[in-house]
Amino acid sequence: MDGQLDRRAELSEFLRTRRARLQPEDVGLESFGRHRRVPGLRREELAQLAGVSVAYYTRLEQGNGQNVSAEVLDAVARALRLTDAEQAHLTHLAKPKQQRRRAGAPRGRQPVRVALLQLLDSIDTVPAYVTGRRSEILAWNRMSAALFGDWGKLPAAERNWARLVFLNPDYRELFVDWEQKAYDMVSFLRMDAGRHPDDPRLSALVGELSVKSEEFRRLWATHDVKEKSYGFKRMRHPLVGDLTLSFETFRLVDDDEQAFVTYHAEPGSPAADALRLLASWGTDAPASLPT
């Protein structure tokens, strides 16, 4: 791929895939005839639901969203029944003028505040790490090294969740629900692509993963998006076996593209015992912080 993603093509494909997943009966419209030429809603039906002309919506779906108003985007988002993450993604792609003025140029690897590094180092019973744009792993503590492997042994460019999930076979073994983890990673990258389509490092990452992983290509083509939040992961660790951990994601106030992520076990559970074992065995594992 070249140095940037094609925002117009991204907008067009995103709207088409969202429209294709809705049937007329899903939105209270009558479906006339058994044989419809397109999957999901027609453009005319979507335009009717959004309260805009067919020509206006057609221009938007063709990628001409530069001058679209926030009100129209909201109406289209409601008609398509978008999630909050999908609506934010639509806004990023369409890029109203007021948002374009706020958007910054893509930067390199993001620095992590010293106080945050100190906080990571002080947490010795819970795996915790900081991620940034492009799914980069920016900093982590000793428990993360014990649970996920010593990221400090990897070149900086390979300290990236998407690369690890799709290109490192150890992570396919680590995550019991690897398919869900893979879907999540692609959905996160899609959100980044909407915010920063002109980021050459992100474009290069997507290009590399598309070439090297058939699963990544398939998931990228769905145009699904989501934000990091909370939930649980089932893992099969080579030292302590199966464990289920809850994770929480905290966006930083001063840089909402960085997230502080923690994994913890339910008190008294087998997973809590497994984490204690990892803590005792992993006391010599270095906390790998950016240099």
Image: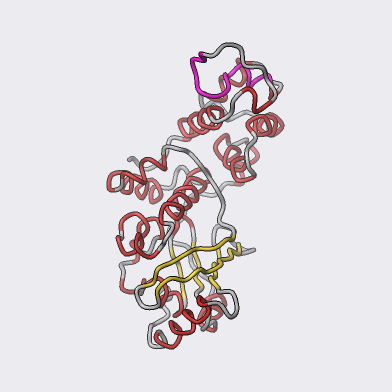
Which residue corresponds to the image point at 49% horizontal and 84% vertical from the top-left?
276
Which residue corresponds to the image point at 54% horizontal and 62% vertical from the top-left?
258
Residue 38: in magenta span: yes
Name the one closer to the observer, 49 or 274.
274
Q: Return the residue found at the far left.
A: 212
Residue 77, given in percent of the width and then of the height, sits at: 65, 34
Residue 242, given in percent of the width and then of the height, sits at: 43, 71
Which colour scheme appears in the figure? secondary structure
Q: Please identify the quarter of the rendering in which residue 235 is found.
A: bottom left
The image shows residue 26, relative to residue 107, as above or below, that is above
Name the one closer to the observer, 105 or 212.
212
Which residue corresponds to the image point at 42% horizontal and 37% vertical from the top-left?
221
Q: How many badges with numbers are in the image?
A: 0
Name the one closer to the observer, 155 or 219.
219
Residue 157, given in percent of the width and then of the height, sits at: 34, 61
Which residue corresponds to the image point at 55% horizontal and 48% vertical from the top-left?
226
Task: Read off the magenta span.
Answer: 35-48
Name the side, left or right, on which 251 lies relative to 210.
right
The image shows residue 192, relative to residue 62, as above or below, that is below
Residue 4, given in percent of the width and then of the height, sits at: 40, 41
The quarter of the picture where the C terminus appears is: bottom left
The image shows residue 253, relative to residue 80, as above or below, that is below
